[in-house]
Image (cartoon, grey):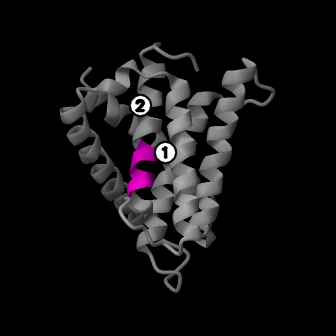
Amino acid sequence: MTTNQQYDTAVQTSKEIFLSKTKDYGTSWRVYRIISVADQIYIKAKRIRTIQEKGEQKIGDDIISEFKGILNYGIIGLIQLDIKDDELEELPVDTVENLYNEKIAIAKKLMLNKNHDYGEAWREMSQESFVDLILAKILRIKQIIANKGQTLISEGIDANFYDIINYAVFGLILIEEEVHTS
């Protein structure tokens, strides 16, 4: 499979989970502020890091499901950045699917552009590095929030969410290829 196909496959399983949960719970995540979305991603990345360091886990969700959760919370973060607080909390499933597809298309285009320039260097990276990069991006988001959304020369919150999504996809691809353990 090509990277393009692998990306789509990794995203598809995550999207199916996202849409199923939307059918079960509605868009209850609409109440999250960006800091809460960042904290959800932080918790998931921190859990992967703890499992990596301890070499064991005590609850059922594996590293694969945590990477899928990180990807999906990244999408939530991007949607929340676009939808104003005073807009409807409950969104129809088809609207959510369209928003998901829109955000993932932008993330994929970013990945393809970076792959062009970096030559798929991510394929030689460790799963630990993806987790560390996700954690660093979350800390950046938190600092931007503390700075009232202002940056001097750095990318904004949205760019960090896009990178987080792509790091999660890379983790999923390399687990699928059995380069990394789950």
The segment highlighted magenta reads 159-165
Can residue 92 be seen from the camera position used here? no
Please state the horizontal and vertical placement of residue 102, each as a whole percent of the image. 31, 58
Measured Cα–Cα span from mark 1 to mark 2:
10 Å
| Residue under numbered circle 2 | 170
Can residue 71 be seen from the camera position used here? yes
Which residue corresponds to the image point at 42% horizontal and 67% vertical from the top-left? Answer: 151
Please state the horizontal and vertical placement of residue 155, each as a whole percent of the image. 37, 59
Toward the viewer: 2 or 38?
Answer: 38
Q: Amino acid at mark 1?
A: Leu
Give the dominant element type of the magenta stretch: helix, strand or loop: helix
Choose top left, top right, bottom left or bottom right for residue 64: top right
- Compared across the picture, whether 5 is left or right of 66 comes to left
User: Under tag 1, what secondary structure?
Assistant: helix
Please state the horizontal and vertical placement of residue 35, each as a whole percent of the image. 61, 64
Which residue corresponds to the image point at 49% horizontal and 83% vertical from the top-left? Answer: 87
- Compared across the picture, whether 128 is left or right of 155 comes to right
Q: Is residue 44 above or below residue 172?
A: below
| Residue under numbered circle 1 | 71
Which residue corresponds to the image point at 64% horizontal and 62% vertical from the top-left? Answer: 36
Label 2 crowd bin: few (<14), some (14–19), many (20+), radius 10 Å = many
Q: Quadrant of the N terminus?
A: top left
Q: Is residue 76 above or below residue 45?
A: below
Label 1 crowd bin: few (<14), some (14–19), many (20+), radius 10 Å = many
* Disc nearer the start of the sequence (1/2): 1
User: Under tag 2, what secondary structure?
Assistant: helix
Choose top left, top right, bottom left or bottom right for residue 59: top right
Q: Amino acid at mark 2?
A: Phe
Q: Quadrant of the C terminus?
A: top right
**Which residue is the extreme one toward the bottom?**
86
